[in-house]
Image (cartoon, grey):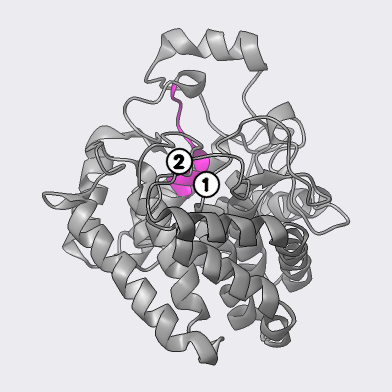
Amino acid sequence: MVVTKENLIAKSIQLIKQNQAKTGAYLASPGFANYRYAWLRDGAFTAYAMNRVSQHESARRFYQWCDGVIQKHAGKAHHAIAYVRQHEGEVHWNDLFLHTRYTVEGDEVAGEWGSFQLDGYGTWLWGLAEHVRMSGEREWIQAFAPSIELTLDYLAACWRLPNFDCWEEAGDKLHPTTLAALYAGIKAMEPHVPQRADECASLAAEIRQFVREKGVLGNRFVKSLGNPAVDASSLWIGLPFGLVCIDDPLLAGTVAQIERELLTGNGVHRYAADTYYGGGQWPLLTAWLGWYYVQVGRRKEAEELLVWIATKDQPAGLPEQVQEHLLAPEDYHRWLESEGPPAVPLLWSHAMFLVLADELGFV
């Protein structure tokens, strides 16, 4: 069957629904062992996509799951906050901190997996505000108030600490994209927690200034402080996190570098030194670049990226990455032998396809 944008839109919505647990959690990828769990970050972007296509009940159930996770691990969060305050910046990663992935029941997953990672905790706050904006269900802000306030406390205490990036790598560094996620979550809560509005505004401004001063090389954002490479996730700093405006020269410079180094044909790689499954092209990042193109008036190019993504659909769904052009081909078979084929479907890939399709007016 020829894949069209219309049937892939319908398929994407159905796949996301099918892989949402009764608890509300979205399974990252049901067919890939390491991804049969739920991430706050992946899930928040998936819920955002579902909100954009008017599937508000699905999104609401995810945020109810997030609230349950925060409350289940509230004692650990309080302990981590106290630990950071007590040690005043001399903190090294350990299991005191909240994890990045959970079972669908909200339990921690045993084993090391970039456990101290902050981006999901900013992203769920941002996503909740987006849910309220698109669904009109303002009552959930009050219902989730204890989890919101605890997350704000956690981010305020920890944002300066090195932690794993959005790819679960480089846990010894600070990452502009992660900081943008925290900025967005804190800023999004400013109008919803009036008793802490000034605090949120001040903290968000401090994070924004830090990124603009420390996370820049020339006319673009860097992958991490201490790593000057370009990373395609830097698109998120502008879209959707809004740490910079869409027409900010730093975002334009970052996109230009992504196009030079990471765009092969119509597929976007994560970063030039990527060796995971050989460093293929990621549909979700391709959709992100298309989202940017729409915002800056490059619609024809955005449509070409949407078509490219649709051609990568497999019977099981969209993959995490495709191997048409590998940055490190010698590493592909090593991963294949160790972990099996790349993840298919990846719900996040379907989510970002939906976002781009909606941005182009096809939903």
Work out whether residue 102 or residue 23 is closer to the camera in this orientation and state it: 102
Which residue lies at the image location 65% right of the left edge and 40% below the top edge?
346
Q: Nearer the viewer, mark 2 or mark 1?
A: 2
Depicted 46 relative to depicted 316: above or below: below
Q: Residues within 10 Å of mark 2 (few under 14, many from 20)?
A: few
Residue 133 coordinates in the image, percent (x, y): 59, 82
Quadrant (top left/top right/bottom left/bottom right) for the C terminus: bottom right
Judge whether residue 283 is colored magenta: yes
Q: Which mark is residue 92?
A: 2
Q: Give the SS element for disc 2.
A: loop
Which residue lies at the image location 61% right of the left edge and 40% below the top edge?
95
Which residue lies at the image location 26% right of the left edge and 41% below the top edge?
259
Depicted 102 relative to depicted 33: above or below: below
Work out whether residue 141 or residue 196 is closer to the camera in this orientation and state it: 196
Judge whether residue 47 is colored magenta: no
Q: Residue furthest bottom?
A: 194
Q: Is residue 147 left or right of residue 80?
A: right
Between discs 2 and 1, the one toward the N terminus: 2
Q: Is residue 87 left or right of residue 15?
A: left
Depicted 110 relative to depicted 61: above or below: above
Residue 202 coordinates in the image, percent (x, y): 35, 79
Q: Residue furthest left?
A: 218
Q: Residue furthest front?
A: 86
Amino acid type at image mark 1: Gln
Q: Which residues are magenta?
A: 279-287
Amino acid type at image mark 2: His
Q: Which residue is identified by label 1?
A: 117
